[in-house]
Amino acid sequence: MTAMKHERRRRNYEGRFVAVPLALIETDAWRGLSGTAAKAWVSVCALYAGSNNGFIAVSSRALGERIGCHYTTAAAALLELENAGFLRRVKASSFSQRRLAAEYRLTHRPNDVTGEGPTHEYKRPKLAADNVVSLPAKGA
């Protein structure tokens, strides 16, 4: 095969892609994720552009549309990803002044806001229920 054919074949892909490290999917935390949460993680990773980790804005409504589920299911998937250590919320959502989506960082990538390296929180077992993030109670 000539070099020209090889070059043409290499450039013939369907746009951007999401790389999933094998070390990540071989963890107990990944195996414990629901299918919806895994799908949500891939969708959030697709929003990572190489220099916006810590600025990845995700609303549960937009995520629900992207992965084909109701926004409450998408919100639960985001919480599951936070509790498992795959995502960390950097900035909470706000509806009081203007509608702002929450901002997240991927824990397997360096943080572009602070410059710190990847934390790989999904590799550490959760020891206490204090670390669990949950939805606020109705009426609160």
Image (cartoon, rainbow, N blue to C red):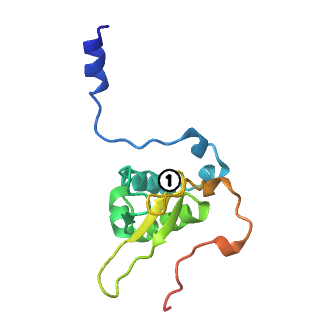
Q: Residue 81: horizontal and vertical position, in percent?
A: 54, 61
**Tag 1: residue type?**
Pro
Residue 13 located left or right of residue 116: left
Badge 1 marks a residue whose secondary structure is loop
| Above or below: residue 93 compared with residue 42 | below
Q: Residues within 10 Å of mark 1 (few under 14, many from 20)?
A: many
Residue at the far top: name it: 1
| Above or below: residue 111 compared with residue 24 | below
Residue at the far bottom: name it: 139
Residue at the far right: name it: 127
Residue toward you, 47 or 110: 110
**Dividing the picture into quarters, in which one does residue 71 lie?**
bottom left
Q: Residue at x 40, y 77 (%)?
A: 93
Residue toward you, 56 or 115: 115
Q: Quadrant of the N terminus?
A: top left
Q: Residue 83: horizontal and vertical position, in percent?
A: 59, 65
Residue 129 located left or right of residue 140: right
Q: Residue 11: horizontal and vertical position, in percent?
A: 27, 27
Q: Residue at x 55, y 64 (%)?
A: 82
Q: Residue 136: horizontal and vertical position, in percent?
A: 52, 83
**Dividing the picture into quarters, in which one does residue 15 lie?**
top left
| Above or below: residue 8 compared with residue 16 | above
Residue toward you, 117 or 133: 117
Q: Residue at x 38, y 50 (%)?
A: 46
Q: Residue at x 48, y 65 (%)?
A: 78
**Would you name the residue on which mark 1 appears?**
110
Residue 102 located left or right of residue 84: left
How many numbered dots are placed on residues in this image?
1
**Dividing the picture into quarters, in which one does residue 25 lie?**
top right
